[in-house]
């Protein structure tokens, strides 16, 4: 996939990954290219679906969500997967849901105020979804780094 991007595309994506609010004119200046070239390339990358959106990154701890947890969900049967994922999307504390291989069918990322809040989310919401057979949770002590893309 990387071969479809030239040097300019990769540099633009790298600069946007570091700061999605960076002015196009500043990117053009840093790359020593025209402002219109940056606009054209970003428009092309957006049209191709490479750039989906620019978003703010929230600090969950500062918002009062001190417990970050990854939870593996086992299903009673594989046929429940889509229905379970639709129901998981309705739970505000779940910020990411992945359909995976292995012992679990689904892996979710949750942010809760504390462990008691996590317990309530799991037992009062997730476990009540039709098709969920069980869960195993893994508390995240700290996030060492996080990347938005592989472009360098």
Image (tube, grey):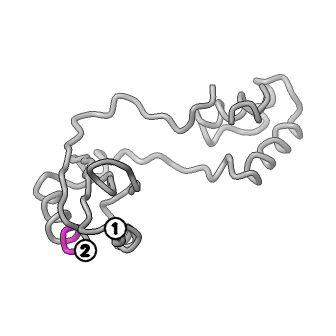
Dot 1 alpha-carbon crowd within 10 angstroms: few under 14, some 14 to 19, many 20 or more: some
Describe residue 113's horizontal placement relative to residue 10 as left or right. Answer: left
Q: Position of residue 42 (x, y in %)?
A: 77, 44
Looking at the rendered structure, the secondary structure element under dot 1 is helix
| Magenta stretch: dominant secondary structure | helix
Where 36 sits versus 112, above or below?
A: above
Asked whether residue 26 is in view, the answer is no
* Residue in view at x 21 percent, y 35 percent: 141
Total numbered circles: 2
Picture quadrant of residue 120: bottom left
From this view, report whether residue 80 is shown above or below residue 9: below
Q: Give the percent coordinates (x, y) of residue 116.
A: 10, 57
Residue at mark 1: 88
Q: Which mark is residue 11?
A: none
Label of residue 129 in the image: 2
Q: CA distance from mark 2 to mark 1?
A: 8 Å
Asked whether residue 128 is drawn in magenta, I would say yes
Cβ atoms at labels 2 and 1 below 8 Å apart = yes
Q: Position of residue 145 (x, y in %)?
A: 40, 30
State the residue at coordinates (81%, 41%): 41
> For the magenta stretch, what is the residue range?
125-129
Q: Residues within 10 Å of mark 2 (few under 14, many from 20)?
A: some
Which quadrant of the figure contains the N terminus? top right
Quarter-of-image position of residue 135: bottom left
Tag 1 or tag 2, which sits nearer the N-term?
Answer: 1
Q: Secondary structure at mark 2?
A: loop
- Closer to the camera in the image, 5 or 131: 131
101 sits left or right of 4 in the view: left
Quadrant housing residue 150: top right
Does residue 42 show up magenta in the picture? no
């Amino acid at each position: 996939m990387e071969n479809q991007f030239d040097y300019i595309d990769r540099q633009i994506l790298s600069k946007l990954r570091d700061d999605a609010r960076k002015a196009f004119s500043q990117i053009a200046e840093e790359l020593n290219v025209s402002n219109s070239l940056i606009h054209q390339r970003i428009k092309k990358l957006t049209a191709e679906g490479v750039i989906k959106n620019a978003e703010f990154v929230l600090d969950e701890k500062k918002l009062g969500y001190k417990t970050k947890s990854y939870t593996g969900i086992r299903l009673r049967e594989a046929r429940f997967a889509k229905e379970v994922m639709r129901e998981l999307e309705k739970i505000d504390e779940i910020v990411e849901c992945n359909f995976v291989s292995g012992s679990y069918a689904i892996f979710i990322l949750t942010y809760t105020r504390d462990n008691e809040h996590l317990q309530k989310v799991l037992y009062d919401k997730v476990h009540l979804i039709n098709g969920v057979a069980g869960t195993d949770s893994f508390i995240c002590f700290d996030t060492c780094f996080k990347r938005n893309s592989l472009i360098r």
